[in-house]
Structure formats: structure tokens, C-alpha cells
Image (cartoon, rainbow, N blue to C red):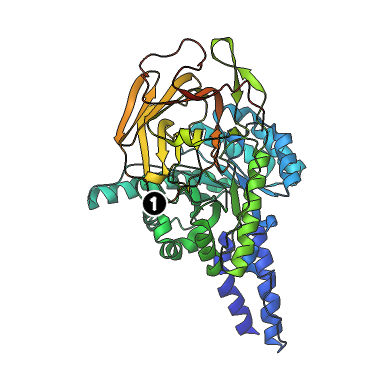
């Protein structure tokens, strides 16, 4: 029996860093199993309730990136009720300065509805006065969530600079640990972007923290930050996961498409393989669904749950199949005031699709629209033609994080950046001139990008024109759009219109969004 007890302790030691409920359930299951083995009783074959697949169960989920990205701007009470309606019982709180007065109301609502506060987006410095305010809020409500800490930084250029950066970051994190520990809160590294978002750099920070005597800092792994301009975890994820697994306390899931786009689970190329690696490793921590795409958070989270359930079923079969679920796209919000006394469409809750035709795929063409975007933290798809699988696909958007105007030409394997931000809650006249050899982008009559284009690859896969969303529905737009016009030929875009766009001799299609049916 002593041998059995020792085996229980060894096999559960790493689970203690994970959320307490999952640890207890796993400890009890292992204890009962090993106890029966010690007494000579045979065990049934492992079935669908096995812990390796149980991490995808709804009672192990938490919601993340909800508060700043919910187009419905729910109150704390409405948000907690939404979680109950969805069957989500855990929450990690992401906030902005405007949310500070609601901290107490948020915790009151969560406790009232039985929602566990798993974590909290932390200020980056122990000197930030908001950190003390947050910790005192926890004390008043007797809660002890994890503090998720992000960072950034460009790549280092030498071993000396790398060592200095690691030491600086370890000192920063140590300062947060010293603040949080008296309140019963643990600090976790959140792989966000750039240098700090690269797992080997986070592991180096953890090693340095151990030298400083700090041994209880873990990691939060985010699929949404698994690749960026500097790294791509999807190519070597199995090896990366093996290195970081002992430290990971939570995993946030998204669909794995282009690094600067938020797409739903089951719509990407890599999430199945990455989830299989995690499942096969025996990791048993909590799993997050990310509402950062924007729109109605209830719809966004529901779409993620649909994709997760589909992937979990395929993981049991060990192959992904082809019948991917199609995300639910809600009706757009009512029309709102636009430019020149006209109305525009708030597309934050879905956007619209309209029919296309072959003429719209024949270069050269000019695409024009008016748009007002408010959120640079998500990809905003302004207008797109055909699905991404088509050689003729193109898309105008704003990039995630920097909010720069850009274009994606999937059939040509190109992304064109303008380095001109447009997510400032101001109206902008945006345009693209696309021909067989070049693509030019314009913001308010000024040319901001001019690039050569490659020959298209792949098959034609005709689809619709989508406005305020991707054709597939896996990306949306956080803002308002008025008038979209596609014309034949390369039009002069130097003059900013002073009236709504109209038909002329070159117009192939003009969509006045105040006249479109709401799909």
C-alpha cells in the first residue's frame, strides 16, 4: 500500500499547479484506480470520460478576452448571466481603465452566479498603483485568482543583451510576485508577442527566477500568440510543448490561421494537431475560449464551443475529417449615422454577404469604401472576395494590434502592409487598385502601399463578396462601413469624395449599405 500511495503522489505532483478543482478530480480518480489495482481488482477499459479527452469538456472551460471585446457592452451582472447560459463556469478577467470602477460589481456578480474567477489581467509593473487596487479588491471578496503578466520587446542581438533582458524581466516578475504573494495570488507568464512571447525566452525567465528563489511562477499558453512576425510554434509544437508542459497552468484556444487573424476553432489549419499533442501528453489544466474576435460575446463564445466540440470528437477518432462546422453569423446591428448625412451599417455583429460575378475577378479593378473602425486589437475585415481557398481571393482589412490598413491576396500568398493605422474611430476613405502586376493601397487619397504581386496559385473557388466579415464567416469587423464600390480599371484615388459614392461608367457594383437587406 505504501508503494501505491507513493505512485499517487508522483503521478499527481505536477497537477497541483493546475486549477484546484481539476487537480482534486484527477487525484480522486487516480487514487481510486490505484487502490483497486493494489487490491487486485481489474479496471474497465478507458472510455470517453478519460482525463486525456476530458480537458475539452465544457466544465473545464473558462472565458477570456470578453470585457473589452464584447460589442454588446454587457454589465457585470449580464456577463455572469451569459456565462451561466453558455454553461461556462470559469472566467479570466481582461479589463481597461474604464472598467476599474466596476471591479467590485464584477466580483459580486461572479460570486452570485457561481462563476469561478480563475485569473486576472495584471499590470506589468509592481509600481503600477492599479496593482495594489486590484489586490485589495481580491482581499475584500476573498478570491485568489492568478495574475497573468504579458511583455514584449524586439529580439536581442547578442548573448550579453539576452542575459540582460532575461534578468530585467525576471526582476520585473519577481516584483509582481512579492506584491501578489501576501494576497494568496500566483503570477503566470502570458506568451503575448515578440521576444517575451517566445517560449524559450519565458523558460529562461523562469530559470532566472529559480536562481532568485522564486519557484511558483507558471505559464499561460495562447494559441493566438503561437506565431507572429518573429516565430511560428506550429512548425515544432510537439517539441515546444514537451519543454513547457510542466509549467503550463492554462491554455487558450483559437483557430490557427494567419498569425494576425482571429478565426474560430475548427476553421484553421493547425489547432487539431496542437490539441492532439496536448491531449496525448496527459496535461489536465483548464482550457480557455477567447472572445477577442469581437461581436456579441455570447455568439463568439458559442461558435468557439461548437468548434471545440467538433475537434474533440475528431480527436477521439484521431483524424480531422472534412465536415467542419460553419460558424453562426448573427444579424448586423441597426443602421447608424454615416458620412454626408447618409446612413452606414454597424457591422460589429456580423457584416453581410452579397453576390459576386466574374467581372469582379478580372483585373484591373478598383475597390473603394468608407469605414470607421474602433478596435485595433482584432483583425477587421472590411471587404473580401471569394473564400481564402480560391486563387482569386482578396481581402481588405486592418491588421491586428497595430490597426494598419492592409490587403491579403491568398491565391498569390501575399499580405500587403501599409504601416498606416486606421482604427482611430474616425471615418477613412479606403481604396485598393489591383492589376495583374501590382497592388496599390490608399488611405484618404494618399497612396500608402505599392507592391508587386505574384502569379496566383491554386484552383478557382468562386464565392460571394463579403462586407464587414470574411466570406467564410470566421473573421469579422469591429466598426462601421458605408458604401462599397468596385470599378473596372485603375481609377484615380487622389481626391477624397465629398459625397456618397455613386455609379459611373466604370462601376461594376455599388453597395449602399443603408439599402442592403440585413443578413
Q: Position of residue 239 (x, y in %)?
A: 41, 65
Residue 155 visible, this orientation: yes
Secondary element at image label 1:
loop
Height in image: 188 above or below 320? above
Residue with the most extreme bottom position: 40
Height in image: 339 above or below 277? above
Height in image: 165 above or below 238? above
Give the residue drawn at x 66%, y 27%.
Answer: 517
- Report whether 39 appears left or right of 6: right
Q: Nearer the viewer, residue 483 or 145?
A: 483
Give the residue drawn at x 71%, y 44%.
Answer: 83
Residue 55 visible, this orientation: no
Give the residue drawn at x 62%, y 20%.
Answer: 514
Q: Nearer the viewer, residue 369 or 113?
A: 369
Which residue is the site of mark 1?
198
Q: Position of residue 27 (x, y in %)?
A: 66, 69
Q: Position of residue 79 (x, y in %)?
A: 70, 37
Instruction: Classify mark 1: residues with Cα within 10 Å, few (<14), some (14-19) or many (20+).
Output: many
Q: Nearer the viewer, residue 312 or 450?
A: 450
Amino acid at each position: 500500500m505504501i508503494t501505491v500511495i507513493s505512485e499517487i503522489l508522483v503521478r499527481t505532483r505536477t497537477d497541483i499547479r493546475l486549477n484546484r478543482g481539476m487537480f482534486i478530480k484527477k487525484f480522486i480518480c487516480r487514487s481510486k484506480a490505484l487502490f483497486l489495482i493494489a487490491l487486485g481488482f481489474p479496471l474497465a477499459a478507458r472510455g470517453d470520460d478519460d482525463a486525456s479527452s476530458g480537458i475539452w469538456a465544457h466544465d473545464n472551460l473558462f472565458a477570456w478576452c470578453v470585457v473589452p471585446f464584447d460589442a454588446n457592452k454587457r454589465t457585470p451582472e449580464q456577463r455572469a448571466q451569459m456565462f451561466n447560459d453558455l454553461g461556462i463556469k470559469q472566467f479570466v478577467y481582461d479589463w481597461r481603465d474604464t472598467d476599474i470602477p466596476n471591479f467590485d460589481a464584477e466580483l459580486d456578480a461572479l460570486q452570485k452566479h457561481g462563476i469561478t474567477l480563475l485569473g486576472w489581467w495584471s499590470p506589468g509593473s509592481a509600481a503600477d498603483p492599479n496593482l495594489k487596487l486590484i489586490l485589495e479588491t481580491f482581499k475584500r471578496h476573498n478570491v485568489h485568482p492568478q495574475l497573468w503578466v504579458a511583455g514584449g520587446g524586439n529580439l536581442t542581438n547578442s548573448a550579453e543583451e539576452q542575459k540582460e533582458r532575461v534578468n530585467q524581466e525576471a526582476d520585473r516578475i519577481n516584483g509582481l510576485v512579492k506584491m501578489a504573494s501576501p494576497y494568496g495570488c500566483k503570477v503566470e507568464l502570458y506568451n503575448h508577442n515578440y521576444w517575451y512571447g517566445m517560449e524559450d525566452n519565458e523558460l529562461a525567465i523562469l530559470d532566472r527566477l529559480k536562481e532568485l528563489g522564486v519557484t511558483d511562477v507558471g505559464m499561460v499558453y495562447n494559441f493566438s500568440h503561437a506565431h507572429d512576425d518573429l516565430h511560428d510554434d506550429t512548425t515544432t509544437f510537439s517539441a515546444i510543448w514537451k519543454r513547457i508542459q510542466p509549467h503550463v497552468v492554462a491554455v487558450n484556444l483559437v483557430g490557427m490561421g494567419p498569425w494576425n487573424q482571429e478565426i474560430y476553432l475548427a476553421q484553421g489549419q493547425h489547432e487539431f494537431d496542437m490539441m492532439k499533442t496536448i491531449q496525448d501528453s496527459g496535461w489536465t489544466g483548464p482550457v480557455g475560449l477567447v472572445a477577442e474576435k469581437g461581436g456579441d460575446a455570447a455568439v463568439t463564445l458559442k461558435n468557439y464551443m461548437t468548434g471545440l466540440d467538433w475537434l474533440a470528437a475528431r480527436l477521439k477518432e484521431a483524424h480531422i475529417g472534412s465536415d467542419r462546422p460553419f460558424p453562426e453569423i448573427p444579424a448586423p446591428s441597426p443602421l447608424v449615422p454615416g458620412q454626408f448625412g447618409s446612413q452606414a451599417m454597424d457591422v460589429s455583429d456580423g457584416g453581410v454577404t452579397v453576390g459576386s460575378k466574374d467581372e469582379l475577378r478580372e483585373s484591373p479593378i478598383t475597390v473603394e469604401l468608407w469605414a470607421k473602425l474602433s478596435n485595433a486589437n482584432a483583425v477587421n475585415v472590411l471587404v473580401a472576395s471569394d473564400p481564402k481557398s480560391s486563387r482569386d481571393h482578396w481581402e481588405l482589412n486592418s491588421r491586428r494590434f497595430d490597426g494598419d490598413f492592409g490587403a491579403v491576396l491568398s491565391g498569390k500568398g501575399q499580405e500587403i502592409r501599409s504601416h498606416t493605422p486606421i482604427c482611430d474611430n474616425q471615418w477613412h476613405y479606403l481604396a485598393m487598385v489591383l492589376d495583374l502586376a501590382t497592388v496599390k493601397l490608399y488611405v484618404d487619397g494618399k497612396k500608402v502601399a505599392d507592391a508587386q504581386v505574384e502569379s496566383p496559385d491554386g484552383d478557382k473557388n468562386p464565392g460571394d463578396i463579403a462586407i464587414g466579415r470574411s466570406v467564410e464567416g470566421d473573421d469579422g469587423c469591429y466598426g462601421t462601413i458605408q458604401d462599397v464600390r468596385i470599378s473596372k480599371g485603375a481609377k484615380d484615388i487622389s481626391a477624397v469624395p465629398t459625397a456618397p459614392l455613386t455609379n459611373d461608367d466604370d462601376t461594376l457594383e455599388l453597395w449602399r449599405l443603408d439599402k442592403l437587406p440585413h443578413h
